[in-house]
Image: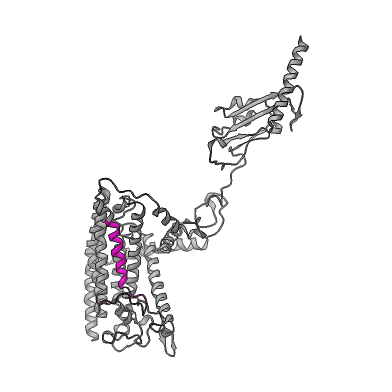
Amino acid sequence: MLVAIYVERKLAAFIQDRLGPMEVGYKGTLQTLADLIKLLKKEVIIPQAANKPLFVLAPIWMLVTVVTAFIVLPVSNAWLGTPTSIGLLFLLAMLSLKTIGILVAGWASNNKFARLGAIRAMTQFLAYEIPLGLSVLCVIVVCRNLDLSVISFQQGLDVYNMYQDSIQTAYFLGIKGLDISHMGGFLTWNLFRMPILIIAYSIFFLTSLAVSNKIPFDLAESESELITGYHTEYSGIYWAWIMVSEYSALFLMSIFGVILFWGGWNTPLPNIGPLKLALYTNGYPTTWLGNIWAFFWLFTKALIFVLIQLWVKWTFPRLRTDQLIRLCWLYLIPLGLSCLLATLWWQLLIL
Amino acid sequence: MQLRILLHAILRLGKALRLTCQHFAKSIKARSKANNSIYLQQEGNSITLQYPHEKLPVPSRGRYKLHNAIDDCIVCDKCAKICPVDCIEIEAVPAPDVIGVTSNGMKKRIHAARFDIDMAKCCFCGLCTTVCPTACLTMTPTYDFSVFDVLEHKVPFASMSEAEIGEKKQIWDRHITDKGILAK
């Protein structure tokens, strides 16, 4: 988390032709730690007319829901998170609950601007929730399973058949007959198993920006319009919790996207003939090396997408409320629905 | 028609992303070039000047902190008189005879017991340097002289100890009384 904040500040600085934190630590690496210590020792100001129980509850709520969603992520072939059979649904539900936390924060602050920010966050939530659900539904149609660990296993070699009854044979590009379960690598990733998922992924990417309130879907915060929106009244440690929940949501959506579309913890190197690269770079489940490899691939891919999200954040301006709603309802929902239909047809044709 | 507009929009978004990426790449490549030159013609890509490590050059005739070469001072009190904010405080002890010569040939007949310039009051107009006959009072290009206690801004330039001041005062008093006796 500390690293993510530091990386974001340096990235933003370099894009804007300036230097970012340079003084604290080597080239500013300890800056986030210094900021954290500062926030911890700051005076916590609760406005007199604010609804005290709700005011204190809101950041805790946001943090708890987002961090709880991390439980179901399979981090490696042996660390499967909590292997619930409805892991995906649990994650989506937790993300939806986070928005209630934003609403509580805005309401309890007794501040017009905070309330406006919270209302806008709710509007944003209503707008992006359906396209998000649709894009995830496309993946569920391909994988026939809600368990995130099963989805990760399906995108690898068939050596890892821990779930014998629910494994699907991977056909390259969804063409029946090109069975590449033995090859593994990026060829078995969901995106390449079902190329229509590229459209689903682009919808997912846009809505993941909306989930973590990142520009261009920055309505709730609107740092230049609403003076930080729903968390205007929060100071010190509460603000730190809200910031942590925001960055955690960013990270969560990146890992989630990687697991659904880009192969989870599987390696991008395929087994080409005698050169069993996929096996080498993925190891066997429950071995130390296997764990390290899987961890490495998952986080590398997730970090690449975090970087892309940050890149997008510092390039584009913010969307207005009506532009956001128009985008999500008029464009993303039909696109998502047609993508879902196409995926269904394709899946039926294969089987 | 709508599709064409959409494609145009997506291409423009892509161009925007490429632009930021170029800026980023340029910044990464030109990361640690020193920026000690003219502000608008820097070598690196960042426009940040990391202040204590890199400073913009100050012209040598910049009017910043005052400095008095006390050995050249003839204690004429012109600077104290012309100062618009009365930041120069001089206490003079006259001497009966010539006590030295300044670097430009003028004879010194007065000791400077105290020569304090209060930089907190100074308005950096430079009038004192204009009227100084020996050019001992100059403005240096030092602009960064912040202190923790405002009283530390009162810079003393005189270099006479208490004993010396007492001694010179005694010499002058004796000279006055001698002259008085002689006049009588």
Q: How has the structure been colored for display?
A: one colour
B140 in relation to A289, above or below: above
Q: Is residue B111 above or below residue A330?
A: above
Q: Is residue A124 among what the camera can see?
A: no
Q: Is A192 positioned to the left or the right of A97 in the image?
A: right
Q: Position of residue B164 (x, y in %)?
A: 71, 29
Image quarter of the N terminus of chain B: bottom left
Is residue B26 shown above or below B91? below
**Along the viewing direction, whichever of A334 and A266 lies nearer the viewer:** A266
Q: Position of residue A31 (x, y in %)?
A: 46, 57
Residue extent of the magenta highlight? A57-85
Residue at the spot 39% in from the left edge and 51% down from the top edge: A42
Residue B3 image-quadrant placement? bottom left
Apparent side of residue B14 relative to residue B183 in the rendered image (left or right): left
Q: Does the magenta run of residues contain A109?
A: no
User: Is any atom of residue A52 visible in this view?
Assistant: yes
